[in-house]
Amino acid sequence: MVSAEAGIDRVLWTEAEVAARVGEVAAALAADLRALPPGPPAVVVGVATGALLFLADLVRRVDVPLAVDFVRVESYGGGTESSGKPRITADLKVDVAGKHVVVVEDIVDTGNTLSFLIAHLEKKGASSISVCTFLDKPARRKFNIQLVGDGKFYSGFECPDYFVVGYGLDYAELYRNLPFIGVLKPEMYKKDSSN
Ligand code: PRP
Ligand code: MN
Ligand code: MG
């Protein structure tokens, strides 16, 4: 039997560290949502698939009325490098016009996915757009993240420039189910030059 964490070089943030930080980010987000003037409930938009675990852990700690929806935006194929052109492969169900939107991501890397998605949500008429990402990797940023209206930027941890997996983050769709953030062994992807 091969365990799910085969291929992990080392753990960057343990399950307990992840949980503690999610609690802090949730408290900050909840306080800001509570302070909003009366209006329609905010819409939390998870970016599938990576945001899956963070979104679930986050929203259950935000005791404020809110809607939850998903978009699917993909900028990586099976490999470790961005393909350059993100595309929306599943759009929102909830109408965000005139509403505060909180985009939830597992990681902001080049910013390609998020800058593209923010423009998309702005076109749909969101009154503000905040971003709540579990990991932020500013060393790799190529696209400026322009928040909308009174939108805020929340981040769990600043991530060093390693290929990290777990807690929603994948390599070739694997490792998302790890409850911690780990660094992938380079030999796991260096041998795979096909994508
Ligand atoms: C990953 C990650 C972010 C995005 C960040 O998604 O979940 O959405 O890349 O990279 P960027 O800032 O350079 O755009 P991916 O496209 O791999 O899809 P996934 O969430 O299904 O893994
Ligand atoms: Mn993603
Ligand atoms: Mg991915």
Image (tube, rainbow, N blue to C red):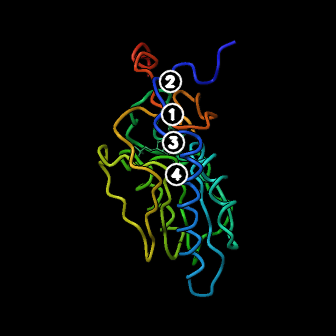
Left or right: 30, with 80 as reference point? right
Work out whether mark 1 precedes mark 4 in sequence or the reverse, and give the earlier one.
4
Circle 2: is it few (<14), some (14-19), or many (20+) Cα within 10 Å?
some
- Residue 74 - label: 3
Q: Which image quarter is the C terminus in? A: top left
Quick check: marks 3 and 1 in contact, CB under 8 Å?
no
> x%, y% of residue 191?
42, 13
- Residue type of the residue flagged with mark 2: Ile
Label 1 residue SS: strand
Quick check: marks 3 and 4 in contact, CB under 8 Å?
no
- Residue 105 - label: 4
Using the numbered discs, state the Cα–Cα distance from disc 3 to disc 4 in whole angstroms: 12 Å
Work out whether mark 3 precedes mark 4 in sequence or the reverse, and give the earlier one.
3
- Residue type of the residue flagged with mark 4: Glu
- Residue 8 - label: 2
> x%, y% of residue 93?
68, 60
How many marks are shown on the rendered structure? 4
Work out whether mark 2 precedes mark 3 in sequence or the reverse, and give the earlier one.
2
Left or right: 189, with 1 as reference point? left
Disc 4 Cβ-to-ligand 1 distance below 8 Å: yes
